[in-house]
Amino acid sequence: MNKLKIFTNGFIKENPALVLILGTCPALAVTTSAMNGLGMGLATTFVLVMSNAIISLLRNFIPDKVRIPAFIVIIATFVSIVDLLIQGFVPALAESLGIFIPLIVVNCIVLGRAEAFASKNTVFDSILDGLGMGLGFTLALFVMGFFRELLGNGAILGHKFIEGDGILIFVLAPGAFLVYGFTIALMNLLPKKKSKETENVKTE
Amino acid sequence: MEYIIMILSCVLVNNIILAQFLGICSFLGVSNKVSTSLGMGMAVIFVMALSTLVTSLLQKYLLVPFNLTFLQTIVFILVIATLVQMVEIILKKISPPLYQALGIFLPLISTNCAILGIAILVTQKPDFSLLDSTLYAIFTAIGYTVAIVIFAGLREQLSLVKVPKKLDGVPIALIISGILAMAFMGFANLV
């Protein structure tokens, strides 16, 4: 696999939130606005890149039997770092993301990539993979946040352009499920075209 | 009276899945049949009560007195993972029938964000005693069980109907959860 493919794999083809259906909890909980989605996505990306890099560096030293606990400790360390950084520098974001920052540690994406990719590949590839997956996740959260904010508050990125309330249900709990469901359904429309394209490339 | 309000709040108003979005992975993953979802619910009640008790003890007598609260995430996740492993081993020895019923769900639970989520949430409530925390965990887990069993019932019916191909599977499950969440919003002013 070439470097570019590793990097872009997480955007559409294996988008963690929309195709692999991982990290569903933050995807539903923090997407009340596009900015929240973006913040959560970037925090997860940081953890993914750092933990992928460290795990890939240590992949020959971690005994196979204790690899999962070892991975969890490494991931939890970076989650704590992110948690403290966000609390220190962007307290407003810490307020709105709340408990979901420490919960990055149980986000299946991070452990999943550590197990499936970083423990088998070189450092550079692992960083690329972490970055690609993280940005794919960020993209999904941003899109969901964008639509929920638009429909629920009548605002784009915090700028309100209609008077009064929007369709409030979309910023409340049910809207999260509905928007997530329809976003995945929309994604289901895409891959067919995509896979045909890659097939064409292969046959050429 | 205080506890009646707490149970109503945990099960109906602030339902852990439908209002707080914790434990969605297992909610979508193990909800194909009512019987398995009931087993999962029981396992969550058991583990959540135990882990919240242990983590609250640790928080109160280790992390806070020694000013180590910044290690909370690392300590909690390791304690919960170990605890689940231990429970699995002990259950296997002591009570094989219970292990048969809950065993397969236990490994799934250690990475369930609901468990860690509640463990962290109760430490953020300063006026919670140890009993309060444990009861809160049990009631929350009952809320989880109620939601997942209802959802499994809906999904069993759903398997009989024809769903548009692009919506089949996860999307329709999420849309149904959305409608279920709307129903639970009806309880909003109860407490």
Image (cartoon, rainbow, N blue to C red):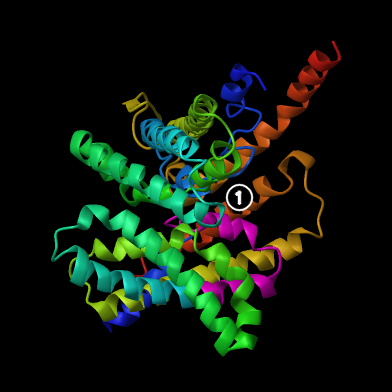
Q: Quadrant of residue B9?
A: bottom left
Residue type, label 1: Leu
Whether the magenta-drawn stretch holds residue A140 is answered as: no
In this picture, is A49 found above or below B43? above
**In the picture shown, does residue A117 fall above or below B91?**
above
- Left/right placement of residue A189 relative to residue A78 reads right
**Residue that mark 1 sits on:** B174
Magenta stretch mostly in which secondary structure?
A: helix
* Quarter placement of the N terminus of chain A: top right
Looking at the image, the residue that sits furthest to the top is A204
Residue B190 at least partly seen:
yes
Quarter location, residue A15: top right
Q: Quadrant of residue B92?
A: bottom right
Q: Which residues are magenta?
A: B18-45
Q: In x, y percent, where is residue A28?
A: 48, 46
* Picture coordinates of residue B61, whole percent (x, y): 19, 72
Q: Nearer the viewer, residue A63 or B14?
A: A63
For disc 1, the chain is B
Residue at the far right in the pictured view: A203
Can residue B141 be seen? no
Residue at x 50%, y 24% (from the top left corner): A124
User: Which residue occupies 33% across, 75% down?
Assistant: B53
Give the camera-side residue of B36 and A143: B36
Q: Nearer the viewer, residue A199 or A188?
A: A199
Q: Position of residue A110 (x, y in %)?
A: 49, 43
How many residues crowd mark 1 within 10 Å: few (<14), some (14–19), many (20+)?
A: many
